[in-house]
Image: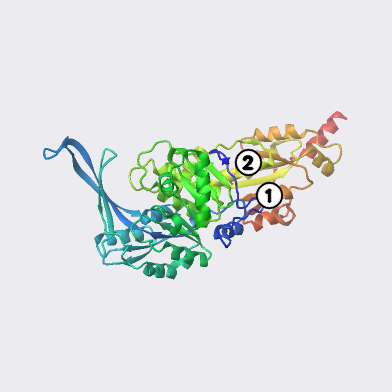
Amino acid sequence: MKIINSGQLCNPLTSGGIRYNFGSVWCSIWRIAKRVNRTMQSNLQKARVLVVGDLMLDRYYYGATERISPEAPVPVVHVKTIQDRAGGAGNVALNIASLEGKAGICAMVGQDEPAQILEKFFAEQSIQAHLMGTHLPTITKLRVLSQKQQLLRLDFEEGFSQIDGALLAKNVSKVIGQYNVMILSDYGKGTLQDARSLIALAKSRDIAVLVDPKGNDFSIYQGASLITPNRKEFEAVVGKCHDEKELVEKARGLIRACQLGGLLITRSEEGMTLVLNTGELTTIPTVAKEVFDVTGAGDTVIAVMAMAISCGYDLISAMRLANAAAGVVVGKVGTATLNAQELHDALHAQTRVDKGILSESALKKAMNEVRLQGEKVVMTNGCFDILHAGHVEYLQKARALGDRLIVAVNTDESVKRIKGNTRPYVGLQSRMEVLAALSCVDWVVAFDEDTPKRIISEILPDILVKGADYEIDQIAGAREVMAAGGEVKTITLKPDHSSTSIIEKIKTTIN
């Protein structure tokens, strides 16, 4: 079992050529991940996710409570504000839109005012609504709140189980080609009565399917790439889990029985556990600091997971993003979403990235951390034998190009091969310590080869920088960085400043 702390990250889909066979065919999660480089430069704005499931209108009455009714021992709420929101599958789509991804929704509604309100919501949020009108009323839930406490909920619904599920599948087939991940958002209202057909449709198009399940029979989601039950929903299917070992064993059994790619079990204050059909297991702790309302938290989790997978993030990183997002929305009241800045801030708050001298493996972990926050990484290299004002100005200019700066430094042996046996005058450890002390430098790493091509090819920075005395095609690692979608830039050097000239002046003075 692997425990991931808030400051750690791993990359199971892109490390060591590991492949995850989700059922009888390669799951599209692997194909998507293979198309992007391991530096995870994709961002959530590129996500294309179709949400299919139970749509509802959530209506909130807010007011003050100052007395008890004379008619019955119940509080009297003086309503001041009425607010309508999209709930169920609609809230999943809104979560995607609020993070600036492309969202579409397929669902059943009535031909009534709530349906019109929902359509307006989706239009305002640039969500592509593919709604199927029926003779049944749109599902509506009314909540009464006072002083951040929910006092009452009223449900108006008949469900859609009497509507032929094939009609919805036909609707989905017309639009599914616009997306690369599909979410099934099941609230048990009948919209997803034929979930297997929808899963088969998506798999035939090489589209990953994530399911937020309902009920005590998960076999209806057979073949799904990933399902995301909370612990209560999971135990309703497999029975009570008395310890961690039993939970994992039952999760693996359920994966085999339903031919799933994996299970993501959300566990409230215990965090999240991801179990894959390969047997791999990962648990991360919760990041929520204060919980006001868990309404819609599951919607946020599956929305962010789907967006991350759509953009090529591996499952562990996707879970990390979803966990941070859930930590934000449970601190809000009612069915809630979060925006990109809130997610960035949440990730930043839980990320502890050490600065200074790092090993290559530690540097790669740090890179993954800051990239989840959308930060741009700059990299340069050199011997930096005798650090001078020209070096400092150059490094400051390099750092100004992005959010983080890596300096790769030749080892002593490497310097000798390049500059002769008399060099370096300053040993590797001292050179690295001086560089790490500069405020413009985030990380310093050593390499032993004559050129930094190998380490640059493995790190793949967003921007690779060298002095303007180099042509782009002469810069080691330039081709690999550009092939991965990065940039290569040169910086004009401070005139009359070089380690060699300083050394010659010293020699002349001594002589």
Alpha carbon distance from label 1 to label 2: 24 Å
**Residue positioned most to the right:** 511
Q: Is residue 437 left or right of residue 269?
A: right
Q: Is residue 188 left or right of residue 327?
A: left
Q: Nearer the viewer, residue 207 or 7?
A: 207
- Res. 338 in view: no
Q: Are marks 1 and 2 in contact (CB under 8 Å)?
A: no
342 to 131, vertically: above or below: above
Q: Is residue 404 left or right of residue 271?
A: right
Label 2: few (<14), some or many (≥20) within 10 Å? some
N-terminal label among 1 and 2: 2
Q: Quadrant of the C terminus?
A: top right
Q: Is residue 477 left or right of residue 5?
A: right
Which residue is denoted by mark 2 in the rendering? 396
Residue drawn 61% across and 42% down? 365
Residue 336 at x, y percent in the picture: 36, 47
In which quadrant of the rendered view does residue 415 lie? top right
Helix, strand or loop for disc 2: helix
Q: Nearer the viewer, residue 511 or 465?
A: 465
Residue 150 at x, y percent in the picture: 28, 42
- Res. 412 in view: yes
**Residue positioned most to the left:** 70
Helix, strand or loop for disc 1: helix
Which residue is denoted by mark 1 in the rendering? 458
Q: How many marks?
A: 2
Residue drawn 73% across and 34% down? 431
Residue drawn 84% across and 30% down? 509
Residue 294 at x, y percent in the picture: 37, 43
Q: Quadrant of the N terminus?
A: top right
Disc 1 residue type? Answer: Glu
